[in-house]
Image (cartoon, grey):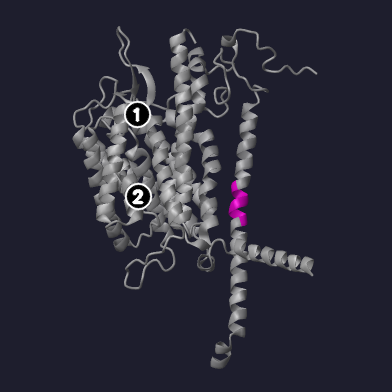
């Protein structure tokens, strides 16, 4: 394997050490990946939130309709 | 680092900011507790998640945009110069990561950049980021119990990563154009954080509307009792504590402020003007004292407004707390809280603005008033250590306050909140609001509980 780690010894002059992290040069690609994930996260959140509320509204309305039917006062008034 | 003294200076500064960041984290803990305490039982989990998740959303935005923007737009751009170059703050730059300060790998950095920023970039970035979370949290409290989380996080990112950062670049940096041209002075961010976030919250509230049942038919407001007073009180104490860290984070702890011989080291403000931690501690505590006293008095002992008064007092005095006498801070705090309290109820009745936690008043009005007060009390003081800048003056402070509250705070949020409203993405459905935002979780918990009871009964047989 030709891979050379950013740091391969700690015995050099510390003043000569720059970045400490591996894969120097990959920063831009990492940024793009992170932004893409975050974009997906926000898209997912907007969509799932809308779906969740639609579902909740349907359940609440359904339950209210059932209650209305089973309520004897409503039957009397009808 | 060239010698022991410069190494000590840099590493002490690095450590100092690291400590302030940890302290400032308490502001967010406090805001979470406070908001959850104020919300009704049926909304508490959603309220918690809405505020907590602004941490990752704003952090991403600030990593990619906010930090660079702070350096880039200090000249306007187009007012005192063009876009500034700040390679160390670009998200893909080697200095936005662990670095020992050796020669740069890329072309757009100098060895001076790497030597300086390798140990300070992360802690400065985090200190500013924590201010961004605070800005987002201020909005969060005002809009509880009816806003959709995704829209809220987007608006919080707008404020936390763009608008407050522009305000800071213009008025809260040593070369910002407002400092240069207007003599704008806002040492502990009365304006650039609090007035701006208050203006932003007000704009969103106009678009969002009040919670169902908040106002009676005759227009008078109903009180929605908080579901946990203790969370509110503990939250407020934590916000005070974190605010102390915030004050420290607004200073550079050690800098040589004398160009000739001998050197003279002091703490300085963001404008590189001298101050002392000792002095600002006097003023922080006296502002808190003034705010608590007047908050207690004007609200006739109401715990909510008393604690809010303490916070509002600090916010009002913050613009000039690097230079005030402690009793200036005390009286400025009192005046600010008194006006903000009165204005809160007037605005609430006039425009039916349902600000659930009084954020617009305590942050927005107090911040705005604090800027004006500093203009009068510090009239004629130099706004910067740099020669040729305008001196602090009331008109400059007023223009700055209007720019920050309305132009950078109110208008962008009003526009984006209107877009969300039109798209049906701003407010939760009425049925869900009445049932409670935690309705679904409660249903599922009920099911789980029932199943567990049945299982245990089966085992018992």
The residue sitting at 64% across, 62% down in the picture is: B445
- Front-lying residue, B207 or B447: B447
Please state, as top left, top right, bottom left or bottom right, where the C terminus of chain A lies in the image. Answer: bottom right
Q: Is residue A41 left or right of residue B308?
A: right
Instruction: Please rate how many residues cluster around mark 2, counting C-alpha atoms within 10 Å: few if below 14, some from 14 to 19, many from 20.
Output: many
Q: Mark 1 lies on which chain?
A: B
Tell whether label 2 touches label 1 (CB within 8 Å): no
What number is the disc on residue B176? 1
Q: Nearer the viewer, residue B306 or B60?
A: B306
Q: Is mark 2 on a helix, strand or loop?
A: helix
Query: In percent of the image, x 50 and y 62: which residue is there?
Result: B41
Relative to B300, is B337 above or below? above
Q: Mark 2 points at which residue?
A: B307
Q: Is residue B332 above or below residue B125?
A: below
Q: Where is residue B32 in the image (x, y as percent from the top left)?
A: 48, 48
The answer to whether any part of residue B138 appears in the image is yes
Q: Splitting the image into 4 quarters, where does residue B97 fall?
A: top right
Disc on the earlier residue, 1 or 2: 1
Q: Give the range drawn in magenta.
A: A42-48
């Amino acid at each position: 394997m030709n891979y050379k780690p950013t740091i391969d010894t700690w015995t050099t002059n510390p003043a000569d050490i720059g970045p400490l992290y591996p894969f120097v040069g990959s920063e831009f690609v990492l940024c793009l990946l992170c932004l893409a994930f975050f974009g997906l996260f926000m898209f997912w959140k907007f969509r799932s939130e809308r779906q969740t509320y639609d579902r909740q509204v349907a359940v609440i309305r359904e339950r209210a309709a059932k209650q209305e039917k089973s309520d004897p006062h409503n039957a009397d008034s009808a | 680092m060239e010698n022991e003294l410069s190494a000590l200076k840099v590493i002490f500064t690095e450590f100092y900011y690291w400590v302030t960041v940890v302290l400032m984290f308490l502001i967010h803990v406090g805001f979470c507790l406070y908001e959850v305490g104020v919300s009704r039982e049926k909304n508490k989990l959603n309220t918690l998640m809405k505020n907590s998740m602004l941490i990752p959303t704003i952090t991403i935005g600030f990593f990619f945009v906010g930090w660079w923007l702070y350096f880039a737009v200090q000249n306007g751009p187009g007012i005192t110069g063009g876009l500034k170059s700040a390679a160390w703050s670009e998200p893909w730059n080697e200095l936005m990561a662990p670095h020992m300060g050796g020669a740069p790998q890329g072309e757009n950095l100098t060895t001076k950049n790497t030597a300086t920023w390798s140990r300070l970039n992360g802690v400065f970035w985090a200190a500013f980021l924590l201010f961004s979370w605070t800005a987002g949290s201020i909005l969060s409290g005002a809009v509880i119990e009816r806003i959709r989380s995704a829209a809220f996080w987007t608006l919080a990112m707008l404020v936390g990563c763009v608008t407050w950062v522009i305000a800071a670049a213009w008025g809260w940096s040593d070369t910002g154009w407002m400092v240069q041209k207007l003599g704008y002075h806002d040492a502990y961010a009365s304006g650039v954080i609090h007035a701006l976030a208050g203006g932003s919250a007000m704009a969103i509230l106009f678009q969002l509307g009040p919670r169902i049942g908040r106002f009676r038919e005759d227009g008078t407001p109903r009180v929605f009792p908080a579901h946990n007073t203790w969370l509110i009180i503990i939250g407020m104490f934590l916000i005070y504590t974190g605010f102390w860290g915030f004050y420290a984070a607004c200073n550079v702890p050690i800098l040589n402020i004398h160009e000739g011989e001998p050197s003279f080291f002091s703490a300085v403000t963001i404008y590189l003007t001298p101050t002392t931690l000792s002095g600002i501690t006097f003023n922080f505590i006296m502002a808190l004292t003034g705010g608590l006293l007047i908050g207690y008095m004007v609200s006739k002992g109401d715990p909510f407004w008393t604690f809010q008064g303490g916070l509002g007092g600090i916010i009002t005095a913050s613009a000039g707390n690097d230079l005030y006498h402690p009793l200036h801070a005390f009286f400025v705090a009192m005046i600010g809280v008194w006006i903000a309290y009165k204005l809160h109820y007037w605005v609430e009745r006039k425009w039916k603005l349902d600000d659930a936690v009084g954020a617009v008043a305590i942050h927005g009005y107090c911040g705005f008033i604090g800027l004006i007060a500093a203009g009068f009390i510090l009239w004629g003081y130099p706004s910067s250590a740099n020669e040729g800048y305008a001196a602090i003056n009331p008109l400059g402070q007023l223009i700055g306050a209007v720019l920050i509250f309305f132009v950078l705070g109110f208008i962008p949020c009003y526009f984006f909140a209107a877009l969300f409203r039109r798209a049906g993405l701003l407010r939760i459905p009425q049925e869900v609001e009445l049932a409670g935002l935690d309705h679904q979780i409660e249903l599922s918990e009920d099911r789980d509980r029932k199943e567990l009871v049945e299982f245990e009964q089966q085992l018992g047989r």
